[in-house]
Image (spheres, rainbow, N blue to C red):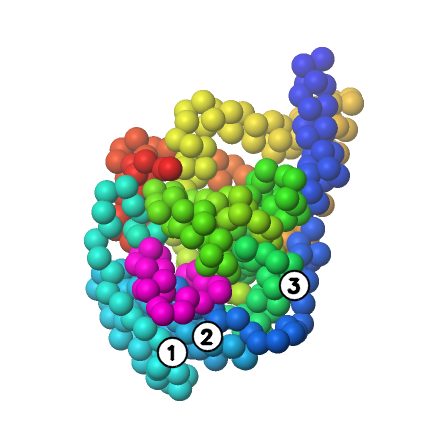
């Protein structure tokens, strides 16, 4: 009877997730940016890029931005966050190669003060420079140093924001999926993110779910100011979702996909992908041991129990377990197709979920040993979030 109860709960969970949780798993329906078309003049946009030891990636990022076809004024501010690898020089050379050296401003970053994460302090410095201009731009594009843009992405994003009177339009970058570790873990990273923050819920004004993807956030500057600016989330480790929540209080927001926004950051080993996951996993649980225990129990019930029941159970419990396993495999298919992975990986989602559980536990361990939120040599999870 207990096994049947567990099987029924697991199956009910997947029926809800697939049928009633914002259709989070259908990736393709969000890739619907409009063709660039705005009546009147195009608003000014300034991109702000925080960069710390990003020499391998920053050149591609700067070239892709400064060659975007955009009819309005568009420039880039790079905050070189105390890099030791010549990030600023690479960026300057890339701007010159693109014939747009006059549209790149590089400023040296200062040491983060108490209460700030490194990235957000760098963003703050860039925004301070932007806001000091005689005429402030309508939009700022908050983007990461490993993001590469193609097509007419900037114009399309501005078009969506203008037509929808949005205070924020954000794109989930297509992460690199080349190495074995990336092929195993990256599609699930996107799948789990969408499960936590269904994009259709994010876009609804009447729904509390709010999120953004930190690699590409087009924000209206006046809305960001009205929300208290980056200062209001200065200690947030999961800064993109904190930004999305901050801006959703000011007006309508949108989060979607596009093949024209891609991350070129390489993660050749499981350890490197694991560091990306573990950096913020425990922060997602608000550093709560109780939430950690609940997450372990919930993921065990939703991802692992169906497999155990399908393989080792009997009678109706086995059939319920098999049905739940197949539902999760089917739900994973659109994300796998987006990353051009074999459909067979859908059946292996429980194994991948186990790996994510391991990295979540590692994240908690790092937090309690003073190494939480480690990124580019900085442990940031001890910072009090506001």
Picture quadrant where residue 145 is located: bottom left
- Outermost residue, front side: 134
Q: What x and y, as percent, mark residue 30?
A: 67, 56
Q: Tag 2: Cα neighbours inside 10 Å, few (<14), some, or many (≥20)? A: many
**Quick one: quadrant of the C terminus?**
top left
Q: Which residue is mark 1?
A: 103
Residue nearest the viewer, comparing 115 with 80: 115
- Where is residue 299 shown, x and y percent of the image? 56, 31
Disc 1 to disc 2: CB gap under 8 Å: yes
Task: Please provide the residue range marked out in magenta.
Answer: 122-147
Nearest to N terminus: mark 3 or mark 2: 2
Dot 1 or dot 3: first in sequence order is: 1
Q: Position of residue 16 (x, y in %)?
A: 72, 33
Residue 234 visible (yes or no): yes
The residue that label 3 is drawn on is: 163
- Check if residue 126 falls in the magenta segment: yes
In the image, residue 335 sits, relative to residue 10, either above or below, namely below
Disc 1 versus disc 3: distance between alpha carbons?
A: 27 Å
Q: Is residue 252 above or below residue 135?
A: above
Residue with the most extreme top position: 1
């Amino acid at each position: 009877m207990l096994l049947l109860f567990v099987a029924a709960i697991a199956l009910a969970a997947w029926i809800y997730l697939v049928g009633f949780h914002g259709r989070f798993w259908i990736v393709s329906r969000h890739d619907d940016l409009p063709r660039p078309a705005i009546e009147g003049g195009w608003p000014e946009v300034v991109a702000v890029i925080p960069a710390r030891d990003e020499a391998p990636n920053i050149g591609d990022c700067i070239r892709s931005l400064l060659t975007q076809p955009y009819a309005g004024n568009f420039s880039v501010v790079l905050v070189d966050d105390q890099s030791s690898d010549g990030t600023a020089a690479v960026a300057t050379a890339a701007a010159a190669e693109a014939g747009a050296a006059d549209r790149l401003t590089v400023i040296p970053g200062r040491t983060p003060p108490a209460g700030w994460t490194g990235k957000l302090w760098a963003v703050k410095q860039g925004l301070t420079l932007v806001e000091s201009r005689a005429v402030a731009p309508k939009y700022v594009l908050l983007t990461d140093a490993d993001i590469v843009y193609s097509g007419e992405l900037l114009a399309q994003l501005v078009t969506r924001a203008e037509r929808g009177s949005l205070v924020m339009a954000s794109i989930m970058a297509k992460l690199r999926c080349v190495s074995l570790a990336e092929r195993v873990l990256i599609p699930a990273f996107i799948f789990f993110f969408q499960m936590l923050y269904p994009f259709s819920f994010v876009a609804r004004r009447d729904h509390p779910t709010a999120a953004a993807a930190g690699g590409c956030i087009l924000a209206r500057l006046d809305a960001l100011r009205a929300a208290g600016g980056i200062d209001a989330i200065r200690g947030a480790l999961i800064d993109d979702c904190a930004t999305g929540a901050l801006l959703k209080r000011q007006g309508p927001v949108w989060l979607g996909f596009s093949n024209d926004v891609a991350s070129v950051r390489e993660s050749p080993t499981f350890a490197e992908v694991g560091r990306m996951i573990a950096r913020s996993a425990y922060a997602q649980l608000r550093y709560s041991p109780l939430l950690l225990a609940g997450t372990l129990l919930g993921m065990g019930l939703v991802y692992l129990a169906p497999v155990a029941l399908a393989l080792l159970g009997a009678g109706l419990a086995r059939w319920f377990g098999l049905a739940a396993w197949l539902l999760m495999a089917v739900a994973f298919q659109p994300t796998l197709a987006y990353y051009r992975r074999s459909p067979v990986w859908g059946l292996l989602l429980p194994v991948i979920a186990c790996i994510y559980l391991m990295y979540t536990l590692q994240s908690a361990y790092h937090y309690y040993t003073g190494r939480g939120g480690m990124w580019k040599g900085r442990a940031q999870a001890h910072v009090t979030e506001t």
